[in-house]
Amino acid sequence: MSTMFRTLALLTLLVSGAIFCAPAAAQQVPGQLQPPAGEQLFLTLHAKGDQVYACKADGSQFAWALKAPDADLFDSDGKLFGKHFAGPSWMASDTSKVVGKAVANAASPDPDSIPWLLVHVVSHEGTGVLSRATSIQRLNTKGGKAPASGCDAEHLNQELRAPYSADYLFFAPK
């Protein structure tokens, strides 16, 4: 009996541990960020780098304006896959490249982070892995926001780099 009791107790502990140690449920993606019907996910990359801002003037008003992202892209094994830069553009190490245009956004669940996006691909280069992409989601953002202050006449055209990370999900026709 004591062996059965120990086995049952051990199983209970293992199941309890699995429940309490399970990762939190993935964030729900807002409806406006869903890719078009007829597309399916084919690639997920993690970006780590900076959002580059420039201090710009609009009349007498000064504000940080996004100049470009500057990030490395990593595959699910943590291997360098390519770069994310102005355009916005994504380029794989096989030199395939896409340029996109943001068509929808939603606030990040993290108030200190840049918004989540849905991007439609507007141009392709090369025949590599990214040549299939038609839509891209930017999710799970951390950081990257421009500061609320510090842009004034003294800092006109000065650049600032805001570290960020995000996941980019690439979609292609089914």
Image: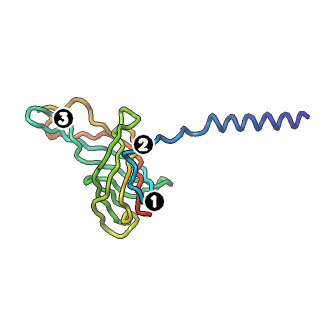
Residue at horizontal 41 percent and vertical 63 percent from the top: 173
Residue at horizontal 77 percent and vertical 36 percent from the top: 10
Q: Secondary structure at mark 3?
A: strand
Query: Which amino acid, mark 1?
Result: Phe
Q: Which residue is mark 3?
A: 63
Name the quarter where the N terminus is drawn.
top right
Quick one: label 2 or label 1, which is nearer the N terminus? 1
Quick one: label 3 or label 2, which is nearer the N terminus? 3
Q: What residue occupies the far bottom of the structure in this picture?
A: 127
Q: Secondary structure at mark 1?
A: strand
Which numbered marker is on residue 7? Answer: none
Which of label 1 and label 3 is nearer to you? 1
Residue 64 picture quarter: top left
Q: Which residue is mark 2?
A: 140
Quick one: label 1 or label 3, which is nearer the N terminus? 1
Residue at horizontal 88 percent and vertical 37 percent from the top: 3
Label 3 crowd bin: few (<14), some (14–19), many (20+), radius 10 Å: some
Q: Is residue 100 left or right of residue 94?
A: left
Q: What residue occupies the far left of the structure in this picture?
A: 59
Q: What residue occupies the far right of the structure in this picture?
A: 1
